Amino acid sequence: MEKEKILIIDEDGFSRVCAAILASEGYTAERLLHDTKQVAGDRVGLVIASYPFGESYSTDLSQINQPVIVLTDHISRDLLSFLEGLDRSYCLMKPLNFEKFVLLVKNIMSGVQTCPGGYSIV
């Protein structure tokens, strides 16, 4: 069974916009309301987290098996350290190109884009 739920860890405004965009593509997006480990289980196929907002969840994110898309305004040593702590991640720069963002999400969720380990800055 394809995992269609996506967990979003970001400020409320962007979380709502992101959830609406993903819903228009057929995905169910859940905004983080509790501990990541409780939400990012078998039913979650992807986590989207902004940096530095999602940094406070780095321990939880480092313990999950799902791919993570990290959204950021800038590249820094702290960001690279954060990415190195994640098992499988992609990093996208803001402002987002929403067409590329949606394509990356689709490819990850469908299994076309594999995330073998480490991180990629897209």
Image (cartoon, rainbow, N blue to C red):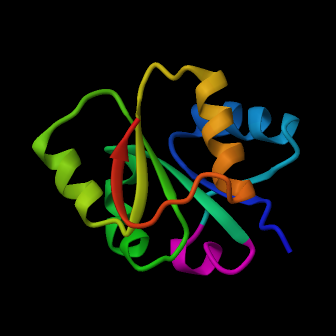
> Residue 34: x percent and y percent?
58, 70
Q: Is residue 41 magenta?
A: yes
Toward the viewer: 59 or 93?
93
The quarter of the image holding the C terminus is: top left
Q: Quadrant of residue 102?
A: top right
> Residue 108: x percent and y percent?
63, 53
Toward the viewer: 54 or 25?
25
Residue at image location 82% in from the left, 49% down from the top: 27
> Residue 11: x percent and y percent?
51, 40
Toward the viewer: 20 or 103?
103
115 lies left or right of 42: left
Q: Quadrant of residue 46?
A: bottom right
Q: Note whether residue 14 is visible.
A: yes
On screen, residue 98 above or below 1: above
57 lies left or right of 96: left
Q: Quadrant of residue 19?
A: top right
| Segment tinted magenta in the rendering | 34-43
Residue furthest to the left: 77
> Residue 40: x percent and y percent?
61, 73
Q: Note whether residue 35 is visible.
A: no
Residue at image location 70% in from the left, 56% down from the top: 109
On screen, residue 81 above or below 35: above
Residue at image location 45% in from the left, 66% down from the top: 116
On screen, residue 22 above or below 85: above
The quarter of the image holding the N terminus is: bottom right
Q: How many marks?
A: 0
Question: Secondary structure of the magenta portion, mostly?
Answer: loop
Residue at image location 49% in from the left, 60% down from the top: 115
Q: Is residue 38 magenta?
A: yes
